């Protein structure tokens, strides 16, 4: 796979010709319907295999190798007639070797809501290990709100994707509730009811694993949360189920704040089977504009996590959405949320050139709307996804977890499938 950044005046046809592939293969890999609509700065994935390249003036073996993402030695080995490559000439035919082998096999979790478009899910199932269905709301008395999840569970199992039950301390009106967490972690009657209700639901619905997503827990309930995780993990293991937790993106053990303090990385690493790092939302819905998952910050979280959690228990979070902020940003205003595909479409519609922040390893652009208000959009593309996947290899993680898979992102799936094989547990 090659990631090509669109330059002024380029088309899918010219990009395909440059790399010696068909326009159809590029359109298909990027799920593009109109080959004439591209944004300057847009990242386009180009399928790779053994192909023919015609040397251009000024070319060198090193430059050709860089363009195709292969080693110069691999090109020389594939083309013994070019010798050491120092005397290639325009018009000469060079065979480009196939891409390097994949970097290994990982687990992939995707969060989805019960009403997620099933046609969209069908296109991702081949690259999922787990489907975490969000979410059973926990009540203060330990009861669970009902969830119409049976169709999604059945669909996941039909496609060899393990369905995961998610429980969350979310109030009926929305938002995580500190009070609900306090009740079920400290009231023995409520906790007994919760454990029994989880066990009954797991058995009745045919779930493979449990994902505990308790957020905004009081710092003084940290040990109570660890004790609950130990208890529910023992119960789940007796029934043959795995247990996951979702944790805030911490940089150290003593990080302050209601979101962080009760999430004990070291304890979760000892107790449960998988820990999902929620490595996103630096740029958040109600916050000032910035990259949603800047790679420098993600790296810092992963570095801390692997110091106290076995790497093979860690699933690194990846966001699958874009934010559009109106400028100047005013505190209390909310960004517009949409898919990464829509982010590119808006750039094209507004004739905006996509830029790339090398520190955050994230794309962004500015545009003006019909009311002449300035906007900034931060999103993910093939380049930012590739950088995130490199962390999985670098730190030897179990895999990744997408929040969520309910929006289209075809280039992500192409980059993922080109980089890793995906484990199936069913």
Image: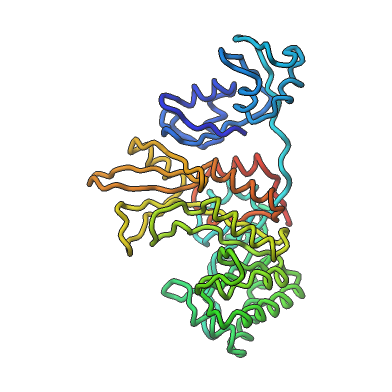
Q: Quadrant of residue 195?
A: bottom right
Residue placed at 59% from the left, 83% from the top? Answer: 185
Question: Is 328 in front, or is 405?
Answer: 328
Asked if residue 180 is positioned above or below residue 354 in the image, the reply reads below
Residue placed at 23% from the left, 45% from the top? Answer: 372
Q: Quadrant of residue 288?
A: bottom left
Question: Is 89 in front, or is 409?
Answer: 89
Quadrant containing the N terminus is top right
Left or right relative to 351: residue 400 = right
Marker count (numbered) = 0
Left or right relative to 324: residue 182 = right
Question: Is 302 in front, or is 44?
Answer: 302
The spot of residue 168 in percent (x, y) is 54, 72
One can see residue 146 in this view: no
The spot of residue 216 in percent (x, y) is 51, 74
Residue placed at 60% from the left, 66% from the top? Answer: 252
The spot of residue 118 in percent (x, y) is 54, 53
């Amino acid at each position: 796979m090659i990631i090509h950044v669109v330059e002024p005046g380029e088309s899918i046809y010219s990009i395909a010709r440059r790399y010696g592939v068909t326009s159809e293969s590029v359109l298909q890999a990027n799920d593009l319907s109109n080959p004439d609509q591209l944004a300057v700065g847009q990242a386009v994935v180009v399928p790779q295999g053994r192909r023919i390249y015609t040397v251009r003036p000024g070319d060198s073996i090193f430059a050709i190798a860089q363009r195709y993402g292969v080693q110069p030695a691999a090109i020389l080995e594939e083309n013994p007639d070019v010798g050491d490559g120092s005397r290639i000439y325009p018009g000469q035919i060079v065979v480009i070797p196939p891409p390097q082998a994949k970097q290994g096999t990982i687990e992939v979790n995707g969060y989805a809501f019960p009403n997620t478009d099933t046609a969209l899910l069908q296109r991702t199932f081949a690259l999922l290990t787990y489907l975490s269905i969000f979410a059973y709301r926990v009540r203060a008395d330990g009861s669970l709100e009902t969830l119409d999840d049976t169709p999604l569970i059945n669909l996941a199992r039909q496609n060899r994707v393990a369905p995961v039950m998610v429980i969350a301390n979310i109030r009926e009106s929305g938002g995580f509730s500190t009070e609900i967490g306090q009740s079920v972690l400290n009231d023995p009657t409520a906790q007994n009811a919760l454990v029994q209700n989880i066990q009954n639901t797991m058995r009745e619905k045919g779930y493979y694993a449990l994902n505990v997503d308790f957020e905004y827990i009081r710092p003084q309930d940290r040990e109570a949360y660890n004790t609950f995780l130990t208890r529910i993990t023992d119960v789940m293991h007796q029934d043959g189920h795995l247990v996951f937790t979702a944790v805030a993106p911490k940089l150290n053990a003593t990080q302050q704040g209601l979101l962080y303090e009760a999430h004990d990385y070291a304890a979760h690493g000892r107790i449960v089977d998988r820990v999902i790092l929620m490595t996103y939302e630096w740029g958040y819905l109600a916050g000032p504009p910035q990259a949603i998952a800047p790679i420098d910050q993600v790296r810092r979280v992963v570095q801390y996590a692997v110091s106290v959690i076995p790497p093979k228990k860690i699933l690194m979070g990846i966001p699958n959405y874009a934010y559009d902020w109106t400028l100047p940003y005013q505190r209390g205003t909310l960004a517009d949320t949409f898919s990464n595909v829509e982010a590119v479409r808006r750039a094209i519609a507004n004739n905006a050139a996509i830029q790339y922040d090398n520190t955050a390893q994230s794309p962004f652009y500015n545009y003006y709307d019909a009311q002449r208000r300035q906007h900034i959009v931060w999103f993910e593309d093939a380049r930012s996804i590739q950088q995130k996947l490199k962390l999985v290899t670098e730190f030897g993680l179990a895999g990744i977890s997408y929040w969520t898979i309910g929006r289209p992102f075809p280039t992500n799936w192409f980059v993922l499938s080109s980089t890793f094989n995906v484990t199936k547990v069913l």
